[in-house]
Amino acid sequence: MTNLVADVAETVEEHPDSAAIAYEGTELTYEEFWERAGRFAQALEDRGIGEGDRVGIYLPNLPQFVTAFYGTLRAGGIIVPMNPQYKAREISHMLGDSGAKAVVALADLVPNVLEVQDDTEVEQVISVGADVEGATEFDDFLADDTTGIVDRADDDVAVQPYTSGTTGTPKGVLLTHHNLAFTTRANAGVPPGGFQASDRLIGTLPLFHIYGMSVVMNGAMYSGGTYYPVPEWDAPTVMQQLENDEISIIFAVPAMFNDMINQPDAAEYEFEALRFANSGGSSLPMEVLDRFEELWGVQLNEGYGLTETSPVTHANTNENRRKGSIGQPLEGVEAKIVNSAERSSADHSGGSSPPEDEEFDEVPRVEEGPIDEEEADLHDITGELVIHGPNVMKEYYGLPEANEEAFTYEDGKRWFHTGDIGYWDEDNFFYVVDREKHMIVTGGYNVYPREVEELLFEHEDVADAAVVGVPDERRGETVEAFIVPTPDAEATPEDIKQYCLTNLAAYKHPREVRFVEELPRTTTGKVQKFELRDED
């Protein structure tokens, strides 16, 4: 049996009376959760929704998300997770593109589904939190009986998340049962001693995103630990929960850790049970890492992954870490830095290898990282990070041209192009300099925004920062910085410019500095730089 939930079935047998989900003072044991997932699966089956059918989940982090997720898989279906911040227009694309037949939605969001239902194949709308006309309330939807687990092949799709769409129309990513099972098991071995049945994992990361879904929720259910869903990010509330509920593992994005260290009373919190903290989703500023460790004495490790890689590909561990690195590839995952100026023109959309392999050259490794990016010639040591392994997606859904762009075949292997620029060292640690699409070319020089942002985070008056390239008649592009100042900041925009000019080559310093109240971010903490550019 390949179905991803087979692992959970084993956990239920081993820990039937242990808490699987803890939410607002109530707990569901593994046996209780599994019974509800089985009733959800049976309810789908009763309505003719089963093997290979899509089910949208349009919820914040709630116990019902977990039930619907595993219930859908148990019935042989495919989950289409949807951001609960999306409006009707945005979910219309996801539901129409995927062909979802059912949607589980928060009661307040059901009207968005009903608004677009006639333009989709949605037959069943399930409401969470209240009765809504046109939908069936979640508990009323559940069947009286449970169903077993529908067998699925390794290569069958389990989840179809959509890329964030920060630069264009979101693409459906086909992740198989094997993709997710591999990633769950591999990542569960990253903390010291691996995930334990005694662990308490806090669900700060949204479950509609593959990071929170695969790493935290699946990791907890795989190991027998307890999952604590957090419906909405609020730093003080989460910090109180870390302390009171004796949370042992936290995965979050840099923006969340930055919020935590900037709380006025941050030093008053004691996270005595916390044994592992991991940052992913975007680059982790060193100032945030150092301050977190200084405050709470817990090592904060950086990892790396993408929706298309299920997501984790690289990790630092408590025993094996280099600050500034995204870590080493997980066991079973291959990665390299290549000079990939050309892509194969063969059609890879079917997932089979083209007749001839394409060669693309590896960029030489540095002896040991991280290097001084100010002193090094980044042109000589950087290239694109590419990934091969059992965690890499099957393909983009219905997008043959995007699949051609996404993969290169070399030495009989299928390599996924991440679009991230970085370098690697002789100990196989990898370092991401920036996104390829974010690189700024000013007066013929390449500027990597991350380098400037790292410097800005070191300034005592900067709470948050982002750097973008904006059009400039003379230079082509110039550097602009958006700064969220600390509450007691005294520095002016001119002070920030001078600070950067003192510490960076002249062509890298921001010509414009703008103070803002907050940066536009996705729910997963990524800065939406296109919105910053649009402000100009």
Image (cartoon, rainbow, N blue to C red):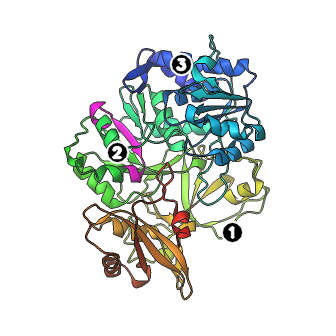
User: Where residue 48 sits in the image (x, y, percent)?
Assistant: 76, 22
Q: Residue furthest bottom?
A: 474
Q: Nearer the viewer, mark 2 or mark 3?
A: 2
**What residue sits right under mark 3 in the picture?**
34
Q: Circle 1 sits in a helix, a strand or a loop, which is it?
A: loop
Considering depth in this image, is 246 or 175 the residue closer to the camera? 246
Q: What amino acid does circle 3 point to?
A: Trp
Decide which of tag 2 and tag 3 comes sooner along the chain.
Answer: 3
Considering depth in this image, is 530 or 297 the residue closer to the camera? 530
As drawn, the label of residue 342 is: 1
**What residue sits right under mark 2 in the picture?**
235
Could you classify mark 3 by the number of other residues whose Cα lies within 10 Å: few (under 14), some (14-19), or many (20 or more)?
Answer: many
Q: Residue furthest front?
A: 133
Q: Circle 3 sits in a helix, a strand or a loop, which is it?
A: helix
Q: Residue furthest left?
A: 268
User: Where residue 395 sits in the image (x, y, percent)?
Assistant: 69, 48
In the figure, is residue 495 to the left or right of 169? left
Spatial distance from mark 1 to mark 3, Cα to Cα? 49 Å
Which residues, given as a range, are shown in magenta? 242-256
Q: What amino acid does circle 1 point to?
A: Glu
In the figure, is residue 260 to the left or right of 304? left
Q: Circle 2 sits in a helix, a strand or a loop, which is it?
A: helix
Considering depth in this image, is 277 or 116 the residue closer to the camera? 116
Magenta-drawn stretch contains 248: yes
Residue 55, located in which quarter of the rendered image? top right
Residue located 41% across and 46% down the image: 252
Q: Are discs 1 and 3 less than 8 Å apart at CB?
A: no
